[in-house]
Image (cartoon, rainbow, N blue to C red):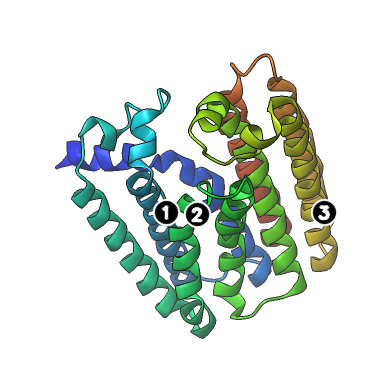
Amino acid sequence: MIARLRTYLELVRFEHTLFALPFAYGGMLLAGRGWPGLETFFWITLAMVGARTAAMALNRLIDRAIDARNPRTAKRHLPQGVVSPGEVLALSLVSLLLLGIAALKLNSLTAALLPVAVFFLVSYSYTKRFTWLCHYWLGLTIGAAAAGGWIAVTGAFEAATFALWAAVGLWIAGFDILYATQDFHFDRHNRIHSVPARFGLALALQIARVTHFLAWLGFGLTGLLYGAGTVYFLGVLGVGVVLWYEHRLVEPNDLSKVDAAFFQANVVVSLGMFTFVALETLL
């Protein structure tokens, strides 16, 4: 039982929850201008875990044929037969059920937006089949975690909510473009759409840099619309430094550090920004 649970956690790369969950909590703290209470925190956590697990499981299920042909992904659980498509579908449905329960428990707006959330979670995996904008669709989807944490507390959208959503979405899109550079040749030969496949490695890295610069501006705009203090903007400054460092790691002729740029730097961004938001709102 424990071994099977570990397999499922590996399947959905559960550790990557560290990218989106801190921003959901950040949206929660900003919206409530402090701690919103244990019950709200619990339902936000359940919604996030359900949404993230469903999205990754569905991605693995929908892309299993593509993954089997790609040398980088051929050893994933579904291509190797470690788990069955039926198991992954069941995991997806259970995770969507958890998301649905949490959305219904939070407030009327989160309940009303549940079908929209499910649409985005399911649709992302198909976008790479027809548009190089798939990275931005992913950003829109995962960035909704921050907006979701916000409206879970207030039951309403504000200008700062959309600014935070855009900032997180652009940050996600930027590092997804970096990650996609690893599949540049495979994507071109198999008609998989991505920014690197469409524009080449050098221009793709430039697009990722511009995308991350816009994300950084978005975090700053969020603070301005919110009326944040010095602590928050110190966090924004720190994010800018980490993003600059991230792009120093990756060059068109040297993609060996993509994994470090993808995971390590972005965990620092998400946890670091959350830390400064927490200091801003809780102290």
- In the figure, is residue 51 to the left or right of 239? left
Q: Amino acid at mark 1?
A: Ala
Q: Amino acid at mark 3?
A: Gly
Q: Residues within 10 Å of mark 2 (few under 14, many from 20)?
A: many
Q: Quick one: which residue is furthest to the left in this view?
A: 1
Residue 123 placed where, x, y %? 47, 59
Nearer the N terminus, badge 2 or badge 3?
2
Identify the residue shown where x is 71% and y is 67%: 162
Q: Amino acid at mark 2?
A: Tyr
Cα separation between marks 2 and 3? 27 Å
Residue labelled with disc 1: 55
Marks 1 & 2, CB-CB < 8 Å contact: yes
Residue 133 placed where, x, y %? 64, 49
Between residues 143 and 124, which one lies in front from this camera angle? 124
Cα separation between marks 3 and 1? 29 Å
Residue labelled with disc 2: 124
Instruction: Say what secondary structure mark 1 lies in.
Output: helix
Please determine whether, in this image, residue 30 is positioned above or below residue 82: below
Residue labelled with disc 3: 220
Which numbered mark, 1 or 2, is in the foreground of this view?
Answer: 2
Which numbered mark, 2 or 3, is in the foreground of this view?
Answer: 2
Please determine whether, in this image, residue 226 is positioned above or below residue 239: below
Identify the residue shown where x is 44% and y is 72%: 39
